[in-house]
């Protein structure tokens, strides 16, 4: 594994666990080290420094044009959603846009039933897609990279996973928009978001669902992470809402250690990013992850557990089992 990443993993520390119902969160901190400065997607858009549009009037589902007019890079996370234009999209990988640059960014559609303009430019949706959608999207992006096809996802699989979330949530969406699930479950999600407080200097979050580690996200700047904290929590909390059984689960420190050991022992490959840095991909025993590294600094890292490949258990959502079986039998 790359020495920058091994050194980074050794320098992580974990805070006190916070528990709410069937979800637990462990804050992540970096003991030492410096990070380059950059804006987040929301910051840059709020300042009018970042414009994301369709490639042209015809549009291209897997690609968009991002124009960063700021004199500082802009970070857009894997799974961060933008809404508007001809259909809502999410980033296929984390991108650090160069200052004063125009970049073609790789995306997936999260709104299957629309292909017409609702606005000239995209805006921030305040959502990072559900973590299981990110997991399966990353699997297909890895396959695409291995075949030399860059950061392309299996769009059909992304739609299938979003459809499963919609069925589990009982959400009716005229255009099959993923964001409608988060809007529909806002009250329940807010209960979870209010339970997990941001710590000073926090760089990330490690999430447990029903007592089992499911994944983590880390961002190099604590100020940037503070802008992303609620977004990332929602990405995991939507599963907690849909799987809530009214129980509270014990969280074992050994789960964190085991998960991190799997990452350290995983295989990695690196690819040139579409912005600054190198895009690292990890696969190991029951884990998958990615990391953007620039200037000897891990800018963002996200890893997910893969032991249980089902998005939902039929015991959690009674109407899901038949559909899940059909999807499990499909060859992608």
Image (cartoon, rainbow, N blue to C red):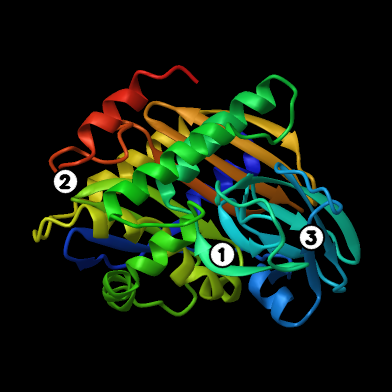
Expressed as whole percent of the image width and height from the top left, the position of residue 64 reads 77, 51
Label 1 sits on a secondary structure element that is loop
Give the residue displayed 27% in from the left and 49% down from the top: 168
Give the residue displayed 74% in from the left and 32% down from the top: 150
Closer to the observer: label 3 or label 1?
A: 3
Asked which quadrant contains residue 152, the reply is top right
Residue pointed to by mark 3: 53
Residue pointed to by mark 2: 316
Indicate which disc, 3 or 1, sits on the residue closer to the N terminus.
1
Give the residue displayed 29% in from the left and 46% down from the top: 213
Label 2 sits on a secondary structure element that is loop
Expressed as whole percent of the image width and height from the top left, the position of residue 225 reads 54, 69
Task: Measure the alpha-carbon separation of dots 3 and 2.
Answer: 39 Å
Q: Farthest residue toward the left?
A: 247
Indicate which disc, 3 or 2, sits on the residue closer to the N terminus.
3
Expressed as whole percent of the image width and height from the top left, the position of residue 177 reads 50, 55
């Amino acid at each position: 594994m790359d020495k920058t990443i091994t050194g980074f993993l050794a320098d992580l520390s974990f805070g006190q666990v916070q528990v709410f119902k069937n979800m637990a969160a462990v804050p992540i901190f970096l003991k030492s080290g410096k990070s380059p400065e950059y804006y987040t997607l929301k910051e840059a858009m709020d300042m009018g420094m970042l414009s994301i549009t369709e490639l042209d009037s015809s549009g291209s589902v897997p690609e968009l044009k991002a124009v960063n007019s700021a004199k500082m890079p802009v970070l857009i996370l894997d799974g961060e959603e933008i809404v508007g234009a001809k259909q809502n999209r999410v980033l296929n990988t984390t991108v650090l846009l160069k200052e004063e640059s125009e970049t073609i960014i790789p995306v997936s559609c999260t709104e299957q039933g629309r292909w017409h303009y609702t606005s000239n430019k995209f805006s921030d949706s305040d959502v990072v897609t559900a973590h299981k959608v990110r997991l399966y999207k990353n699997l297909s992006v890895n396959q695409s990279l291995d075949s030399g096809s860059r950061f392309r996802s299996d769009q059909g699989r992304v739609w299938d996973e979003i459809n499963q979330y919609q069925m589990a949530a009982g959400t009716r969406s005229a255009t099959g928009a993923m964001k409608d699930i988060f809007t529909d479950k806002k009250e329940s999600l807010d209960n979870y978001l209010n339970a997990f407080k941001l710590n000073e200097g926090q760089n990330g979050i490690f999430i447990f669902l029903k007592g089992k580690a499911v994944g983590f996200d880390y961002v190099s700047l604590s100020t940037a992470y503070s802008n992303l904290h609620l977004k990332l929590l929602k990405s995991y909390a939507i599963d907690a809402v849909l799987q809530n059984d009214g129980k509270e689960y014990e969280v074992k420190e050994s789960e964190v250690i085991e998960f991190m050991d799997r990452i350290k022992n995983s295989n990695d490959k690196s690819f040139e990013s579409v912005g600054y840095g190198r895009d690292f991909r990890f696969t190991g025993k029951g884990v998958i992850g990615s990391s953007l590294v620039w200037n000897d600094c891990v800018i963002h890292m996200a890893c997910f557990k893969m032991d249980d490949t089902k998005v939902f258990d039929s015991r959690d959502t009674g109407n899901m089992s038949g559909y899940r079986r059909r999807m499990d039998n499909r060859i992608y």
